[in-house]
Image: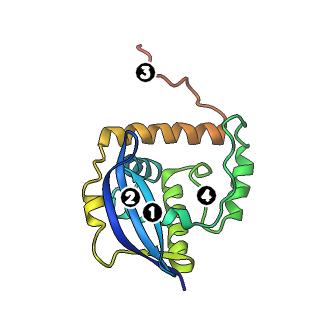
């Protein structure tokens, strides 16, 4: 049976110097209070990383992510990506599927992440909102489609580089087919 963490308060505004977002306060068993800082840009990043489109689902994912099982540590930026065979073998070890950087598609990453979040809610922690404080957050997410698209492209390029060791063509701000 998962622990229930009840939303007690939601504060909007500057959560750190120059960063707008929300502070979500939960009350854990034993009347322990915990504050979760969510920058506004986190909505755009989850949309870009996992192809999520529903702001309510994105917020639910963000609130449950800290309670996931410990995953394999990420590779430092200075380490060359493992060969694709090693990535495929790592996928087989995780019962939920590939991590964001191991997945060969956004769909695979999304489904595995949804599985991890569902496991958190079933086995560990369920964040609840008995007083209905969260709609204010996901109704005012301010996601911009152009910024999400730019972030999605960055995620895809990063994933490709980690999986395959580089892009088949140099990354430029504008790719054009050669003229005949």
Query: Which residue position holds label 1?
Result: 35
Q: Tell us which disc is closer to us: 1 or 3.
A: 1
Residue at 35% over, 55% down:
22
Query: Which residue position holds label 3?
Result: 177
Q: Earlier in the sequence, mark 4 or mark 3?
A: 4
Q: Quadrant of residue 96?
A: bottom right
Q: What distance separates the C-alpha of mark 1 from that of mark 4? A: 29 Å
Query: Which residue position holds label 4?
Result: 98
Residue at 48% over, 56% down:
107
Secondary element under disc 1, as helix, strand or loop, is strand
Q: Tell us which disc is closer to us: 1 or 4.
A: 1
Secondary element under disc 3, as helix, strand or loop, is loop
Query: Which residue position holds label 2?
Result: 23
- Is the Cβ of the residue at disc 1 closer than 8 Å to that at disc 3? no
How many numbered marks appear? 4
Q: What distance separates the C-alpha of mark 3 from that of mark 2? A: 47 Å
Q: Is residue 101 above or below residue 173?
A: below
Q: Is residue 108 above or below residue 2?
A: above
Q: Earlier in the sequence, mark 1 or mark 4?
A: 1
Quadrant (top left/top right/bottom left/bottom right) for the N terminus: bottom right
Q: What distance separates the C-alpha of mark 1 from that of mark 3? A: 50 Å
Q: Earlier in the sequence, mark 1 or mark 2?
A: 2
Q: Is residue 3 above or below residue 140?
A: below
Q: What distance separates the C-alpha of mark 2 from that of mark 4? A: 30 Å
């Amino acid at each position: 049976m998962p622990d229930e963490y009840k939303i007690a308060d939601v504060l909007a505004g500057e959560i750190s110097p120059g960063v707008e977002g929300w502070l979500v306060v939960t009350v854990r068993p034993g009347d322990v209070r915990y504050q979760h800082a969510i920058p506004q840009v986190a909505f755009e990043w989850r949309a870009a990383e996992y192809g999520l489109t529903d702001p309510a689902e994105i917020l639910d994912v963000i609130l449950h992510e800290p309670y996931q099982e410990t995953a394999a540590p990420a590779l430092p930026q200075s380490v060359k990506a493992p060969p694709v065979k090693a990535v495929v073998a790592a996928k087989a070890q995780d019962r939920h599927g590939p991590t964001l950087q191991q997945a060969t598609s956004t769909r695979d990453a999304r489904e595995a992440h949804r599985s991890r979040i569902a496991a958190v809610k079933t086995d560990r922690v369920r964040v609840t909102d008995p007083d209905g404080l969260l709609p204010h957050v996901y109704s005012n997410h301010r996601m911009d489609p152009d910024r999400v698209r730019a972030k999605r492209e960055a995620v895809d390029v990063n994933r490709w580089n980690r999986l395959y060791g580089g892009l088949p063509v140099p990354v430029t701000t504008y790719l054009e087919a050669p003229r005949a």
